[in-house]
DNA sequence: CGATTTTGACCCGCGC
DNA sequence: GCGCGGGTCAAAATCG
């Protein structure tokens, strides 16, 4: 039934490499950190910014600051590419406050399970409203999982939340990934008593990406296991699972109702393995940094300790598939991406364009931390603009 | 031929 | 209890 509508969308093949802007948004939050050298402009700029630097990132400073409460401590304006990046900051900052997710997004995410322990603070903070600055700017909001409380108004995903304990899982919880996974699968079949136990979901992160492409290449390999029509939306939602052995990380991709040009990618769980491919994503960022556990290594960022705890730290790199083939950023063309993510930075909105150089960024997670979810899109998104 | 995608069916929780 | 909607399974189809 629904499929039909859906079908039209996926396929990367069709995606053109033209312009994609990625806005990253995050939704459920967890603070992830991204790294790398970009410039951060304190002013919020609209979506297509016109900045020309390679990595211009604009944040809504205010929101950002608010989140972190940094105002007093950090001078964002001073950040520049040379600096370690905002991630540095992030690392030292207090956790962000949750933001409210745009209605369209909310449907899905919000339900937060119960989580793990996320940031207490956040939890308390509760809802923030973010103002979607611009439609596209999408600020996304995120809420933390835990924070569900806040959000839980939406029940849309009710089941979601309830399900599985994976939550802790991937990294967190106690069960091994495989176990979880299996359980996951088996859930249906086994269901008897299990029902009672509600499953909790793992922490999720959502990113908003403004792009023509539905699928971003974040360095991991994903297998699509389902697609559903989204209520009130012509665009379907696709479900992907990481193909890594034992890795139960899931990803959900759909277009925003509010702005079809925005792709909402929600990650759930942590990867239990390092990023596979260099091939595809060989752009380099990643890696190594594992050792740095918290902190940023030059390239990467790691979530602040407090944030770190759970596994939330993940690293991502996003690239649109189509772009994958393009040799890195080096390609001098202009690329542009705008991402906003709420997880870590709730109302942040930034754009990047034209990277000329490979970003050095790598997000680090403790390696495979399950997380490794964070996109590095920042880094590499190379999108050729026109 | 193995991996991935497609897609209808099914499961499950929730509200009415 | 029923219908709705989200999420997942799994067989078939497709891809590389």
Image (spheres, coloured by chain):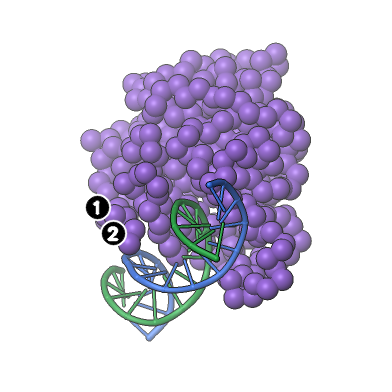
Chain colours: A purple, B blue, C green
Relative horizontal placement of residue A53, taking residue A109 as reference (left or right): left
Q: For residue A14, which numbered disc appears in the image?
A: 1
Identify whether A156 is placed above or below A273: above
Identify whether A343 is placed above or below A75: below
Front label number (2 vs 1): 2
Q: Name the image quarter holding the C terminus of chain A.
A: top left
Q: Residue at x 39, y 26 (%)?
A: A135
Relative horizontal placement of residue A46, taking residue A76 as reference (left or right): left
Q: Position of residue A250 (x, y in %)?
A: 54, 57
- Work out whether residue A114 or residue A13 is closer to the camera in this orientation and state it: A114
Callout 2: SS: helix
What residue is pinned by disc 2? A4
Q: Position of residue A91 (x, y in %)?
A: 68, 32
Q: Chain of mark 1?
A: A
Q: Residue at x 34, y 21 (%)?
A: A50
Say which label, 2 or 1, has the lower sequence index.
Answer: 2
Q: Chain of mark 2?
A: A
Residue A338 visible in the shown view: yes
Identify whether A94 is placed above or below A326: above
- Real-space Cα distance between discs 2 and 1? 18 Å
- Work out whether residue A322 or residue A357 is closer to the camera in this orientation and state it: A322
């Amino acid at each position: 039934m629904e499929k039909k509508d859906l079908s039209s969308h996926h396929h990367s093949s069709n995606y053109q490499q033209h312009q994609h802007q990625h806005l990253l948004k995050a939704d459920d939050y967890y603070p992830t950190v991204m790294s790398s050298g970009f410039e951060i402009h304190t002013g919020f700029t609209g979506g297509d910014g016109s900045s020309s630097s390679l990595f211009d990132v604009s944040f809504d400073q205010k929101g950002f600051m608010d989140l972190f409460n940094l105002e007093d401590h950090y001078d964002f304006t001073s950040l520049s590419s040379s600096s370690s990046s905002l991630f540095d900051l992030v690392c030292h900052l207090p956790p962000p406050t949750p933001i409210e997710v745009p209605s369209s997004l909310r449907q899905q995410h919000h339900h937060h399970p119960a989580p793990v322990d996320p940031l207490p603070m956040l939890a308390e903070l509760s809802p923030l409203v973010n103002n979607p600055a611009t439609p596209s700017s999408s600020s996304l909001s995120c809420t933390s999982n835990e924070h569900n409380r806040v959000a839980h108004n939406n029940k849309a995903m009710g089941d979601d939340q309830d399900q599985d304990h994976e939550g802790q899982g991937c990294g967190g919880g106690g069960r091994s990934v495989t176990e979880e996974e299996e359980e996951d699968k088996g859930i249906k079949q086994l269901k008897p008593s299990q029902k009672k136990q509600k499953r909790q979901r793992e922490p999720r992160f959502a990113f908003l990406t403004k792009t023509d492409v539905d699928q971003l290449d974040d360095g991991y390999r994903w297998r699509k296991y389902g697609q559903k029509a989204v209520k009130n939306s012509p665009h379907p939602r696709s479900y992907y699972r990481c193909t890594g052995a034992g890795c139960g990380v899931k990803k959900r991709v759909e277009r925003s109702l509010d702005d079809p040009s925005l792709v909402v990618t929600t990650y759930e769980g942590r990867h239990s393995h390092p990023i596979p491919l260099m091939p595809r994503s060989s752009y380099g960022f990643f890696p190594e940094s594992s050792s740095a556990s918290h902190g940023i290594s030059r390239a990467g960022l790691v979530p602040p300790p407090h944030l770190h705890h759970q596994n939330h730290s993940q690293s991502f790199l996003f690239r649109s598939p189509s772009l994958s083939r393009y040799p890195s950023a080096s390609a001098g063309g202009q690329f542009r991406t705008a991402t906003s993510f709420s997880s870590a930075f709730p109302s942040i909105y930034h754009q990047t364009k034209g990277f000329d150089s490979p970003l050095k960024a790598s997000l680090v997670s403790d390696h495979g931390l399950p997380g490794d979810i964070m996109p590095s899109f920042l880094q590499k998104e190379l999108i050729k603009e026109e």
